[in-house]
Amino acid sequence: MSITYKASILLGIVVLIAILAISPLRALVSGIFSKILTPSFMTVISTLLLWIFWVVKKVGSSHMTLLKNLVMPRKVLFPTLENEDKREL
């Protein structure tokens, strides 16, 4: 690990300890978390879950269409195969 990486980790730990130790800073940070970060986090999570549900639904629908087309006879899928001699080229 580089010296810059170690210093930034150490600085982060010191800032975290200072925030937890000083009561006004702790109140400020808890207000920021409760009023700004938590609602935005919940919005992101709900949007992500809706998108995952949509993707799973689309994949399932595609698989069902594929299975339907694999099981269905060709003459039902392509009705023009029955009256091949009636077609004009």
Image (tube, rainbow, N blue to C red):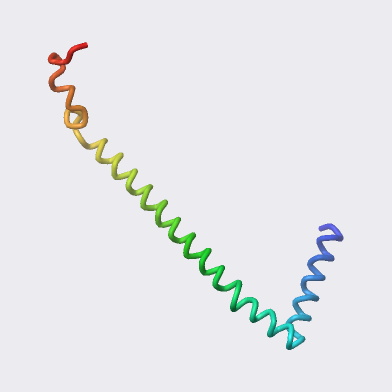
Task: Work out whether residue 41 or residue 18 is closer to the camera in this orientation and state it.
Answer: 41
Q: Is residue 30 above or below residue 50?
A: below
Is 29 on the left-hand or right-hand side of 52?
A: right
Q: Residue at x 77, y 80 (%)?
A: 17
Is 7 on the left-hand or right-hand side of 57?
A: right
Q: Is residue 88 above or below residue 50?
A: above
Figure quadrant of residue 87: top left
Q: Residue at x 25, y 40 (%)?
A: 68
Is 70 on the left-hand or right-hand side of 17?
A: left
Figure quadrant of residue 53: bottom left
Q: Is residue 78 above or below residue 46?
A: above
Total numbered badges shown on the rendered structure: 0
Residue at the front extreme, as displayed? 35
Task: Work out whether residue 28 or residue 56 is closer to the camera in this orientation and state it.
Answer: 28
Q: Residue at x 84, y 57 (%)?
A: 2
Figure quadrant of residue 74: top left
Is 10 on the left-hand or right-hand side of 87?
A: right
* Image quadrant occupied by the C terminus: top left
**Residue 38 at x, y = what percent?**
57, 73
Residue at the top extreme, as displayed? 89
Q: Residue at x 73, y 87 (%)?
A: 24
**Residue 36 at x, y = what percent?**
60, 73
Residue at the bottom extreme, as displayed? 23
* Image quadrant occupied by the N terminus: bottom right
